[in-house]
Amino acid sequence: MYYGNIISVISSDKEKAGKIAESLGKLHENEKLRIYYRKKGDYIRSILVPTEYPEKILQAAEAVSLSSYCVLYLPIVPSWTEGELALLITSAGCKGEIITEMPESDVRKLFKGLPLEEFPIHQTPEEFEGKEEDKGVVYIDKAFVVKGVGVVITGFSYTQVKVHDKLKAIPQNKEVEIKSIQVLDEDQEAVDTGIRIGFALRNVREDEMKDSLLLVKNEVKTVKSFSGEIFLFPWTKIESGNYHLVANGVSVMANLKINGSNVDVELSNEMPLSKRFIVVNVNAKQGKPRIAGYVIPK
């Protein structure tokens, strides 16, 4: 059974991010979110490169929220974008490393007080192999019809899924059955966490799946409102209001009622209750970090 992990390579330098990703895997899907692969036995590494950053912060946040490991490229002369990406990695709770030619002491000083202060520093990325945590969800990025097969979705698995398993599509709350599984164009009877998947679905129409964001197992708790603890960076002050929350590759609008370190959250769609949500303020002033912090549900 295939298993794997998902890595994001992030930088405001799109060309450099692409070269780093090429050293970690082979380009397989050349779209706005580029996806690279490297296969070794039953292990498959997926490398994500968001190409619309810094123009679109949500694309970078969604990619990082899909990843358990982040590779940050730091140019010799950093700008505000590198600071924003450091806040994004911190808010996601992502492990990782820094690729740079800057002196190590300068890097440690730049990220003082953030988890990145302790990240390994290299000039080329290290080999990394792991396995994604089982979250009971499957992220969906596309839904379409294949002649003779029916409705097909593509995405990433964050749980073990077998043929004939039944899961719930979010936000529609529609039960679907897994008709067949493909990984790298090969049929599989089951798939483990951290794998780029193609699922053919039974008893569902394309129009019922076109707006689906996730598949979730029945035991996964989904909510439309919850309370939590909010962690805000001192230079990204926000007040109660509407912001984007990002988790599991999905961004949703949310109304936050902030009272000190406590927050009440009302989501625009029912979502799985993740361990943490990244808070994104897309309306921050130019040059100011759009990553405000993160929320830990209680």
Image (cartoon, rainbow, N blue to C red):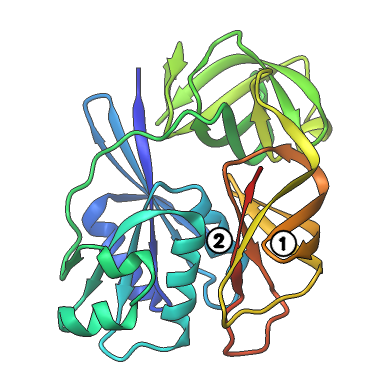
Q: Are marks 2 and 1 in contact (CB under 8 Å)?
A: yes
For the point 35% across and 23% down, the residue is 2
- Quadrant (top left, top right, bottom left, bottom right) of the C terminus: top right
For the point 79% across and 53% down, the residue is 264
Residue 181 drawn at (x, y percent): 51, 19
227 sits left or right of 128 in the view: right
Q: Secondary structure at mark 2?
A: helix
Q: Nearer the viewer, residue 141 or 206?
A: 141
Q: Residues within 10 Å of mark 2 (few under 14, many from 20)?
A: many
Tally the numbered discs. 2
Residue 209 drawn at (x, y percent): 76, 33
Q: Secondary structure at mark 1?
A: strand
138 sits left or right of 114 in the view: right
Identity, as a three-letter code, of the amino acid under mark 1: His
Residue, far top? 164
Which numbered disc flags the more N-terminal residue, 2 or 1? Answer: 2
Which numbered disc covers residue 61? Answer: 2
22 sits left or right of 101 in the view: right
- Quadrant (top left, top right, bottom left, bottom right) of the N terminus: top left
Seen in the picture, residue 223 relative to 236 is either above or below; the reply is: above
For the point 62% across and 64% down, the residue is 58
Quote the CA–CA distance across marks 2 and 1.
10 Å
- Residue position marked by numbered label 1 in the rendering: 244
Residue 265 drawn at (x, y percent): 79, 52
For the point 58% across and 24% down, the residue is 199
Identity, as a three-letter code, of the amino acid under mark 2: Ala
121 sits left or right of 154 in the view: left
Q: Nearer the viewer, residue 6 or 198?
A: 6
Which image quarter: residue 123? bottom left
Q: Residues within 10 Å of mark 1 (few under 14, many from 20)?
A: many
